[in-house]
Image: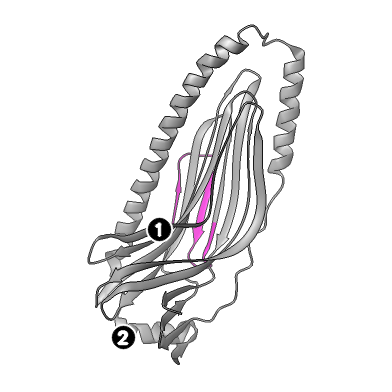
């Protein structure tokens, strides 16, 4: 393979000569689509969980109707649980240190290696009291969401890089490394809690004006607890991800990597559930083409 350009400055100059500039209006459409998809997905899931919570509340009224809400023991146990949650919240996880990769344009099987700064970033929050940040300059995304018996909450964030297809390719490859760290848990004290994270890779075609490919990738999980169950995990790792999409010659494509995190927890009296996610990810580089 022959390297045509090394480093951000050389690659930027060569790309402008060969490809020109990406369309100025090109970033708006995928952002709008991501916003709509994420909001509708959260709304649908939240509606189901709220209805399930309503039915569970009716069952609890029958089973626990004779328990006195003024029992001092219940108040003490509730305060101890709150103290435990506050202790958990003070634990912070570190964002992964990104790999140092040089940006390149190569003749051969690999067409382009892109590194931060990327071309776009996007974030979404369902409500206040949550955190969702995406930094195109570093390729980092930070998500933090918690429900302390407060129903459903969700956040999302991602970054994107432009790709110019010089020729038709029905199996154009887009790949990346995702470095990540997380801490999540869900606890239930007679009530229920849910905890979910998904990561997706998607390609938006400027000429097609739609997603030409979306795929679910790692990291991700889906967990639920009820009636005195408690689950959780704290970990950090890195994982390769990839997808293939039909590329049309002389067309621009916006390649996105994003994560959605959502929690749900309900409560009543001294009893409550809680669910929390802290998630950091870094995309140190992306590859357009085959290895």
Residue at the (35%, 47%) spot, across then down: 37
Q: Secondary structure at mark 1?
A: strand
Q: Secondary structure at mark 2?
A: helix
Classify 186 as above or below 169.
Answer: above
Decide if residue 103 is in sight here: yes
User: What's the mark number on residue 62?
Assistant: none
Decide if residue 95 is in sight here: no
Residue at the (36%, 83%) spot, across then down: 15
Q: Residues within 10 Å of mark 1 (few under 14, many from 20)?
A: some
Q: Residue 258 or 170: which is nearer the viewer?
A: 170
Residue 274 position in % (x across, y down): 61, 33
Residue 169 position in % (x across, y down): 29, 76
Residue most extreme to the bottom? 2
The residue where tag 2 is placed is: 18
Left of 75 or right of it: where is 100?
Answer: left
The stretch in magenta equals 121-141
Residue 146 position in % (x across, y down): 58, 39
Tell which circle, 2 or 1, labels the residue nearer the N-terminal end: 2
Between circles 2 and 1, the one closer to the viewer is 1
Q: CA distance from mark 2 to mark 1?
A: 29 Å
Q: Quadrant of the N terminus?
A: bottom left
Classify 218 as above or below 103.
Answer: above
Q: Is residue 132 magenta?
A: yes
Which of the 4 quarters of the picture holds residue 219? bottom right
The residue where tag 1 is placed is: 215
Proximity of marks 2 and 1: CB atoms separated by less than 8 Å:
no
């Amino acid at each position: 393979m022959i390297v045509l350009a090394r480093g951000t400055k050389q690659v930027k100059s060569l790309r402008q000569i060969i490809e020109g500039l990406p369309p100025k209006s090109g970033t708006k459409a995928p952002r709008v689509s991501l916003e709509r998809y994420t909001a509708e997905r959260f709304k649908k899931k939240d509606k189901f969980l709220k209805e399930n919570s309503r039915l569970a509340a009716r069952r609890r009224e029958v089973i626990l109707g004779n328990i006195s809400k003024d029992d001092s023991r219940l108040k003490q146990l509730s305060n101890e649980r709150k103290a435990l949650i506050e202790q958990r919240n003070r634990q912070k996880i570190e964002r992964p240190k990104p790999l140092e990769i040089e940006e390149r344009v190569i003749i051969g099987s690999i067409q382009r290696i892109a590194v931060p700064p990327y071309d776009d970033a996007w974030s979404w929050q369902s409500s206040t009291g949550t955190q969702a940040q995406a930094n195109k300059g570093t390729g980092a995304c930070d998500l933090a969401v918690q429900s302390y018996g407060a129903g459903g909450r969700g956040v999302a964030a991602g970054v994107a890089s432009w790709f110019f297809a010089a020729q038709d390719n029905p199996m154009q490859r887009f790949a990346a490394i995702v470095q990540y760290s997380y801490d999540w848990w869900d606890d239930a004290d007679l009530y229920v809690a849910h905890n979910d994270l998904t990561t997706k890779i998607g390609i938006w075609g400027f000429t097609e004006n739609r997603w030409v490919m979306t795929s679910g990738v790692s990291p991700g999980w889906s967990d639920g607890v009820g009636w005195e169950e408690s689950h959780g995990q704290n970990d950090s790792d890195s994982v390769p991800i990839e997808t293939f999409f039909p590329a049309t010659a002389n067309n621009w494509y916006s390649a996105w990597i994003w994560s959605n995190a959502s929690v749900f927890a309900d409560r009543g009296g001294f009893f409550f559930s809680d669910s929390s996610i802290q998630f950091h990810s870094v995309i140190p580089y992306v590859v357009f083409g085959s290895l």
